[in-house]
Image (cartoon, rainbow, N blue to C red):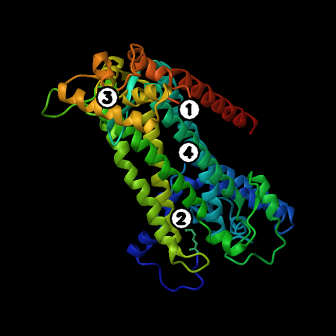
Amino acid sequence: MWAGRFQKALDQKADDFNSSLRFDCRMYAQDIKGSMAHAAMLARQGILPQAEVDRIIDGLEGILHDLNEGKLAFDTGAEDIHMFVEAELTKRIGDAGKRLHTARSRNDQVALDIRLYLRDEAKKIVALIKETVKAVVDKAEESADIIAPAYTHLQRAQPISFGHQLMAYAMMLLRDIDRIQDGVKRMNFSPLGSCALAGTTYNTDRAFVAQRLGFDGVTANSIDGVSDRDFCLELMSAFSILMMHLSRFAEEIILWSSWEFKFVELDDSYTTGSSIMPQKKNPDMAELIRGKTGRVYGNLMALLTTLKGLPLAYNKDMQEDKEAIFDSLDTVTMCLEVLAPMVATMKINGENTYRAAQKGFINATDLADYLTKKGMPFRAAYKIVGQIVAECIAKDCVLDTYPLDEYKKHSELFTEDLYDEISLKTCVEKRNSEGGASPKSVREQIALVKKRLEAEELKEELQ
Ligand code: ARG
């Protein structure tokens, strides 16, 4: 490509080291579509004759078709996808191919390609998150009336509808969708026309290209246009937070499916056996989701570190953006593709969750509330209930069956109705405050999330 300036070819190892084709080839469709829009603009502005541009666009269409059909192989000797397409075009249509790069540089070209590529990929990730939300919501619907313990410090804290805990994850995932969509908003500006870094002396029409490619506008500074990778970082941050959510969920699924909990049983298709211990059913998929979270965080750190010391504008270091973000994309995709059906096929054992909720004095807060509702200040009630709990532990009793005369020794406010008030069913059903843990509240949350999902679908149809 740069034969004019050089007398010697690149050393083979240096050439391999320099080449990004093996990973940036996945942006071939975006690269070609970007070139088509650029060529159309060159004709429209009278920079290239229409007849030449027609040949360029025909040639590019042919290349796109052949790559889609697997009829054209990538030349691994090419430096990157941009060079490959240009060389192939020139091979096919001759000199006209050499004119495509007028008023453009690989620096704005690559910045354009990544934006186009990530915009497409972000949509796919959002669709996968939606599938996961649907699986979670269905499980929550199924388990709204199942009573389970909820934890703080991994100590039994208060009784809840099991669906309430699941819906917490639905809320996180909705925020993940918001974050990704928000990042795409800032990403959706075309850098093409920034050229190497300083724009161009040709009378280009950047807005025309931007509009053709579905951007909301053009970047306003040519140096920023070629050096900015914030949109990669934003997406990778959103992916990191998403993975943190998936990892917490995976961790709970791992705990819940252990013999110690036995709250859920994973379907055989999402578990593995042990090579030596015949009794084992291991939650490998959930563990891998938890494990792979590390590499998604790592990719974000890697790119932040790559960029932090770079003087403006383009530096070859920036080629490192792709492997990092592609790996994050692939990892997030795999995790979501496995998590959604794993949740959908997971069985919840309501008897075990109920049994676990019966132990651990999970209704102690409700007993304190009972006294408080009868007029005692909460702190005083809290102290009395603490003493009763200590007595019960010493005598190996539970609050639900502790005799009334024992209660009365602590306060005359205790009467027979306390037992109904602290039954698990009452405790859960009465937690009707907005966003609370009752089955009724869980159903309201489900309705809310379903509405949001429908709105998302409508938005997509309108696009
Ligand atoms: N393969 C390069 C990248 O991914 C394309 C841009 C090359 N530009 C340059 N001036 N060497 O960053």
Q: Are marks 3 and 2 in contact (CB under 8 Å)?
A: no
Res 379 quadrant in image: top left
209 horizontally vs 34: left or right: right
* Residue 281 in view in this figure: no
Q: Earlier in the sequence, mark 3 or mark 1?
A: 3
Which residue carries the number 4 mark?
Answer: 176
Q: In the structure shown, which secondary structural element does the residue marked by tag 2 occupy?
A: loop
Q: Secondary structure at mark 1?
A: loop
Residue at 39 percent of width and 16 percent of height:
415
The image shows residue 46, relative to residue 359, as above or below, that is below
Q: Earlier in the sequence, mark 2 or mark 4?
A: 2
From the viewer's side, name the closer residue of 193 and 304: 304
Q: Residue 407: percent from the left, percent from the top?
A: 32, 22
Mark 3 or mark 2: which is in front? 3
Disc 2 CB within 8 Å of nearest ligand 1 atom: yes
User: In the image, is residue 249 above or below residue 79?
Assistant: above
Name the residue type under label 4. Answer: Asp
Instruction: Tell whether 129 sits left or right of 392.
Output: right
User: Which residue position holds label 3?
Assistant: 361
The CA distance from mark 3 to mark 1 is 23 Å
Mark 3 and mark 4 in contact? Answer it, CB < 8 Å: no
Q: Which residue is mark 2?
A: 80
Q: Residue at x 41, y 75 (%)?
A: 14
Where is residue 196 shown, x and y percent of the image? Answer: 67, 75
